Each structure stands twice: as structure tokens, then as C-alpha cells.
Image (cartoon, coloured by chain):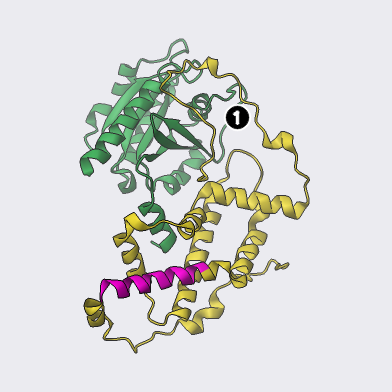
Amino acid sequence: MASNSNNVYSLGDHDSEMEMDFTHEGEADEDLAMGSSTKDVLFDSVIGHIEDIIMEEPFQIIQTSFLEKYYKEFDDSEENKFCYTDIHKEYISVIESYLEIELKKRMSDFSMVEFTQQLRDRKQELEGEIFEILLTFSDFMAFKEMLLDYKTEKEGNTIDLSGGLTVVPVKDKLNLDDAFCISGKSLKGP
Amino acid sequence: MGLLTILKKMKQKEKEVRLLMLGLDNAGKTTILKKFNGEDIDTISPTLGFNIKTLEHRGFKLNIWDVGGQKSLRSYWRNYFESTDALIWVVDSADRMRLSDCKKELHSLLVEERLSGATLLVFANKQDLPGSLTAREIREALDLDSIKTHHWLIQDCSAVTGANLLNGMDWVVNDIASRIFTMD
């Protein structure tokens, strides 16, 4: 676990690996001739790489450094501070650029523009844990929860159940239609 | 737009909508949010950041974002425009002094490109207070009839008693649903 608060997650170190690869100039023509099964294989291999990347240690280090840098900003209260939004935006962009850099390292002709287009084309078939994980990165409530979990871990707080449980008053103050169902779920997906 | 943002937009569930609740400070936004959620509304202090709640309504998942309305906070509103399906504009119907301010802020939101497709619900809140203006009066004061760019409705309500909150929400959900349906 990274213990210093310097920019351990800085992505600048990888700049040298982002050099353009000009050996695939005929790619567009190849792409037209490519059978759909070849495209499937390529698509699947990108997904496979993404799965690898987020499971590997360097990614965990980036994640931890990010948490380390910002956990002190977060409070376990219901109301959110405006700075959470900026921090979340930065988190998303750190992950996005890291994924792109790593994919280019692993597949010299990888193009994010093409890949996102392929995602759109396959909109209906994007099932599986990896997509759930990727979606969690951009889910604000999941992000806040992650920061607060880290904070609790760092500060060694024991779990205080009274803080985690909210006593909800009887809902008879509001005249509810039967059709209206209220629940207090967080934004985090199932 | 990066990979994660693209993916999020693509995978957005059909029956999941994002509602952005704005208005001047002390209009009752957080009270409306908590009332909807069946929470205690006796100890609400001014919102300095933002609150988020997710409710189920008629098979729709409503993600409601309630952002603080103090003057110094209004510049932050723009950070929450993205992907908004409906704007819920909350008005303190008893605050006659600030109606022109209220009108100005509302109309400045309506020209925002990222809110251009959003449904507009105006809650004429605090109808339980003596001396509060009616929905018709608020409608005139805010010059709602001049709005041609958005589907809009004004609903009188009281966050404290809960009166008419559901009517307003029903309309919002119906309007969004019909829009999505027409687009398909």
C-alpha cells in the first residue's frame, strides 16, 4: 500500500510509451475486409485486457494513492460537499487515461475512438461483471462510499452501528397513494 | 468524453431518470426531498452542498439531485446539469420580495444547452403559509407562459404537509416517459 501522499498515481511516467505506431496504416482497409468474427475476437481481447489491467497491482496502487490523497476531504454525512464532484471527475479521468495508456501498451494499434464505437454497436450485448465494475467507477454514490470506507479503515474507527442505521419515521405524515412506493436505496446499483 | 462516461450513458436504464431540483435558498428543496423519502423534516438546515436520493415511483427509478440555493452556491449548479431529464424549480410562494430574483434565475437556466431537453416542473411551495401566492400568481410573476422551449407545469404544493407533491412527480414521470417513448 502506498503510504506517501505524493502523486504516486501520476501517469506522466508512461508518456514515453504513448508513441504513435505507424506500422498499421493500412488498417482501415483491413478493417473493411475483416470478418465479423475477427472483430469479435479483437473486441473480446480488449475486454480481456481491461479485466487484467484493473486486477493488476499497478491499478490497485493508483486507486489507493487516490484514496490516500483525498479521503480526508470526505465526511460521513448525508449532505455532499461540492468538492466531491470535482474529486470524482478527477478519479474518472485518472482511470480513463490509465486504461487507455495500458491498452495501447498491450495492443499497439488500439484506438479508444474505435473501441467506444464498437461498444455502441454492441450496446445490447454488454453483459458481464466487467461492465458492472466499469459502471461503478462513474457512480457517484459508490465513489463516496469507497472514500468513506477507506477513511474508516485509515482512522481505525470501529463500526458504529448507530451511525449506519437510520430510524425512519412512520410514513403516515405523507398521504401516500398505494401506487407510490418509497425506498431509501442509495444510488449504488445492486 | 471518456470511456467511462460513454459507457455510463449507454447503459443508462430505460426506466431510470435524473431529476435536478433547484431554486433560491429557503425554497424548500431539501424538505421536499426528505418528505418524499418519508424522513423527518423538523431539523433541516440550509444546504451548503448537495443531496442525492433515489426513489421508486411507478416503476421508475428517480435519482433526485438537490443542490443548495444560496446566492454564492448558484455558480455550482452548472456542474449538475449533465444528463438531467427534468428540472424541478422550487419556489417559496410566500417570499414575494425575491420573486424577480427567482424569475431571473429560472430563465437563465432555461437557456442552458445541457438542460435544453429537460422537462420543467415548478413547485409553488409553502401553500400552507398564510399570505402565500397562488400557483396562478407565481405563474405570472415568473412569466412561465413565455416559455416555449420546455414542457412545463406549475403545481402548488406544501412540502410540510406533503400536499400535491405526488401530483407534481406524476406529471414529471409521465412527461419524461412520453418523451422517451416518442423518441423511440
Q: What is the display colour for chain A?
A: yellow
Badge 1 is on which residue?
A: B45
Give, as a single range, the part of the protein colored magenta: A35-51
Chain letter behind tag 1: B
Query: Callout 1: few (<14), some (14-19), or many (20+) C-alpha neighbours within 10 Å?
Result: few
Looking at the image, residue A26 lies above or below residue B117: below
Pick the front one: A99 or A119: A119
Residue B143 position in % (x across, y down): 28, 27
Residue B175 is covered by the magenta coloring: no
Residue A88 position in % (x across, y down): 53, 55
Looking at the image, residue B76 lies above or below residue A103: above
Q: Quadrant of residue A76?
A: top right
Pick the front one: B158 or B36: B36
Number of callouts: 1
Apparent side of residue B106 relative to residue A160 in the rendered image (left or right): left
- Under mark 1, the amino acid is Ser
Q: Residue at x 51, y 41 (%)?
A: B72
Residue at far bottom of view? A23
Q: Residue at x 44, y 46 (%)?
A: B80
Apparent side of residue A140 relative to residue B45 in the rendered image (left or right): left
Residue A114 position in % (x across, y down): 32, 70
Q: Which chain is depicted green?
A: B
Residue at far top of view? B130
Viewer can see residue A170:
yes
Residue B65 position in % (x across, y down): 47, 38
> What secondary structure is the magenta-colored segment mainly?
helix
Looking at the image, residue B105 lies above or below residue A45: above
Q: Quadrant of residue A116?
A: bottom left
Residue A50 is covered by the magenta coloring: yes
Viewer can see residue B141:
no
